[in-house]
Amino acid sequence: MTPGRLIVVSNREPYIHEWNKSGIRCKMPIGGLVAALDPVMQKTRGVWIAWGSGSADAEMVDEKGRLLVPEDDPRYTLRRIWLSPKEVSEYYFGFANRVIWPVCHLFQEKARYLSEYWETYREVNQRFTEATLEETNPEDHIWIHDIHFSLMPAALRKELPDNDIALFWHIPFPPWETFSCIPWRREILEGLMGADLLGFHTSSYVANFLGSVRKEFPDAQVSHSAIRYKGRVTRVRAFPIGIDNAEYRDMGSRESIKRRANKLRNKMGVKQIILGVDRLDYTKGILNRLLAFEKFLESHPKYLGKLSFIQVASPTRSSINEYKEMKRQIEETVGRVNGKFQRPQWTPIIYINRQIPSDEILMLYRIADVAMVTPIIDGMNLVAKEYVSVNDNGILILSEFAGASEEMDTAIIVNPYDIDSMANALERALSMSIEEKNRIMQPLRELVVEHDIFWWLDAFIEEWGIDLEIGVNDEEKHTIQKKAQ
Ligand code: GDG
């Protein structure tokens, strides 16, 4: 078999160019998908097709919307697709974030089932399909990511009967009773079934997906891990995503990070620190976590003045009403708790509502005695794995409804709806002996080493059965750079 390149398709691009006062700046967006896939693309040769969302993106590309990334050490091609404000509003904020996202996270009452969202979503899927067809050679393998492109596998399949096509779904897949709220559920399922391989984070999402196919397509043959429909087979498997553990450990143990972390800890003047790091999303359970901290302070006054809770809540999708409302509730709660307990020299909750640099996230992982990763529901949750990777002495409190809990079940597992038990879990975590912490954390440390992002990639590629070309072709690099000049 001739090795082919990897063609990745995702909504979010891995490198964004923005205008600022001093010129053009390149940044990486936050979020699990890019954090997971950029290291993969840097190791394999290929093309990443994504929405060119930055204000200066168009300045950096050739006439086809292409450039090589990362800029300082080019490894692969990024092809940017341009979307109009209407498309962004209806396909991205609309269909992806106000239909699929809430329904798949079991918040179907927050969804807005508007037909204009659906129409634009279809059109954008078609546009990405056309660009992918342009980029793909006969031996290439197409790996589509996430909820934004559920129609692409079937659309590509029509034109490319012999190419390998796979899709990884980064969020939960709900039971049929919930998924069937989507008026266009049949088209979505049919679109996904164009892939040879569909990946989810956990075995229960796999089971939910297969259950939905059974209900919607009674004529499909569905086993516990494959579907035969209209003469084609789609395999459906769980691949719990990991992080680039070596990179996290390496960065987290740099002397400069250690020094700054110690300085911050001394400056805060508290004995213990609790940490939450999330995009400000209603699925992440931030409000319930703050309520649990309030309850904890009320019932354990001996801790007053001795610990602080740092919550990083990085802004996301803030134009959507449901997000605005949640932000208001969270900020009201932070204000109330701080108002109730604060002292001149001590702040109970340090609330950071902006995207902070990665080295500050690492510093926070280092100094946190307890990480509270307590989403209401989450596909996987990379923060849980990043904390375990970087921190040497702390303890992880993890929601049973994060996909990560399927693998990380030795952590202190909590039900994020149960405020009292989360407050009790905090007390347990804060008073735990070093031996007990190690007993809990050691298997988790081993897990993040063994099941890292490259293990995930290998598992996916092996199951997919494709042969990948590794390394950047210098000739191609040269041609694209010349075009971009
Ligand atoms: C989706 C699924 C699944 C957060 N704030 C800042 C910041 N972050 C980084 C974290 C982490 C990433 O963002 C968040 O990853 P998650 O996995 O927690 O969540 P989603 O963005 O919802 O990702 C999720 C994932 O896809 C992968 O499949 O695990 O379930 O929902 O890397 O560190 N990074 C920086 N500043 C911040 O303020 N630099």
Image (cartoon, rainbow, N blue to C red):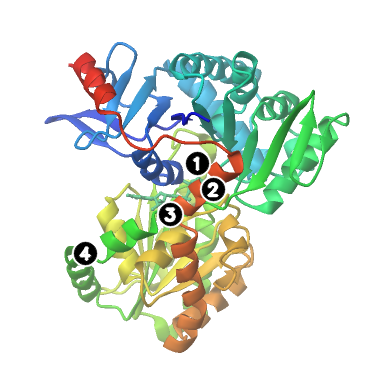
Label 1 CA crowd tier, 10 Å (few <14, some 14–19, many 20+): some
* SS category of the residue bearing label 3: loop
Mark 4 nearby-residue class (10 Å; few <14, some 14–19, many ≥20)? few
At label 3, counting other C-alpha atoms closer than 10 Å, the crowd grade (few under 14, some 14-19, many 20 or more) is many
**Comes first in the chain, label 4 or label 2:** 4
Label for residue 314?
Answer: none
Q: CA distance from mark 2 to mark 1?
A: 7 Å
Q: Which residue is mark 3?
A: 243
Badge 4 amino acid: Arg
Looking at the picture, how far across and down is residue 324, in whole percent? 48, 40
Q: CA distance from mark 3 to mark 1?
A: 27 Å
Which of the marked residues, 3 or 4, is nearer the chain's N terminus?
3
Front residue of 372/51: it is 51
Foreground of the two, 178 or 268? 178
What residue did someone put label 4 on?
Answer: 254
State the image coordinates of residue 460 (x, y, percent, origin top left). Answer: 55, 45
Q: Which residue is mark 2?
A: 282
- Mark 1 sits on what residue? 323
Q: Callout 4: helix, strand or loop?
A: loop
